[in-house]
Amino acid sequence: MGDLHYRRATPDDIAGMAEVRAGDWGTVERWGEIMRLYLAGEHHPRHALPPRIAFVCADGERIVALVAGHLTRRFGCDGELEWISVRPQYRRDGVATQLLRRLAEWFVSQGARRICVDVQPANRSARAFYARHGATELNPHWMVWEDIGKLCE
């Protein structure tokens, strides 16, 4: 790992973000279109409200991780973490934590404190990551931060 930097995503980042996400599952083409529509406010997850945001981590010019979220009313939450993905060689080095904190700061700036995330019951590593950062089980497929602002402290 070289020159890691974190910033708000731009439309120019979508191809790199799609490549990272497709490393988890799906195709670059599919993720590129979904992300383009999502960030443009034209793809609407259930109960999603504007605005929405994405942050990236880049190593030099290469996108190596992303996080995205939006405001919502799903499950009585104020916001929803939509995606978080990190290239395998950058995992376990704090990259996901840094991105999660940036998203938490954005949620707080929007007045959103109770934040939900959809996570498969079998995805033990993701569930453990969210739990380490204060999320608790809402139901078998969802976890919740009752106050995401605690990540900003």
Image (tube, rainbow, N blue to C red):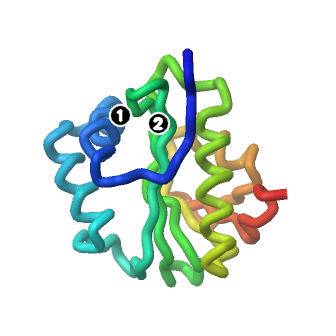
Instruction: Please report the residue visible at 56 percent of the width from the left and 22 percent of the height from the top.
Output: 3
Q: Of the residues shown, which amino acid type is indicated by label 2?
A: Ala
Instruction: Please report the residue visible at 17 percent of the width from the left and 53 percent of the height from the top.
Output: 33
Residue 97 locus on image (x, y percent):
66, 41
Q: Nearer the viewer, residue 36 or 73?
A: 36
Quick one: SS at disc 2? strand
Q: Nearer the viewer, residue 89 or 106?
A: 106
**Does residue 17 sit above or below 111 in this rendering?**
above
Q: Is residue 77 left or right of residue 14?
A: right
Instruction: Please report the residue visible at 59 percent of the width from the left and 46 percent of the height from the top.
Output: 99
Q: Of the residues shown, which amino acid type is indicated by label 1?
A: Val
Compare marks 2 and 1 and give the one earlier in the sequence: 1
Quick one: SS at disc 1? helix
Name which quarter of the figure residue 115 lies in.
Answer: bottom right
Which quadrant, please, contains the C terminus?
bottom right
Q: How many marks?
A: 2
Disc 1 residue crowd, few under 14, some 14–19, many 20+, Cα 10 Å: many
Residue 78 locus on image (x, y percent):
59, 79
Q: Point out which mark residue 20 bears.
A: 1
The residue singled out by tag 2 in the image is 65
Q: Nearer the viewer, residue 75 or 139?
A: 75
Which quadrant, please, contains the N terminus?
top right
Residue 28 locus on image (x, y percent):
20, 37
Distance in Å between CA atoms under marks 2 and 1? 6 Å
- Labels 2 & 1 near each other (Cβ < 8 A): yes
Instruction: Please report the residue visible at 68 percent of the width from the left and 72 percent of the height from the top.
Output: 108
**Does residue 150 sit above or below 111 in this rendering?**
above
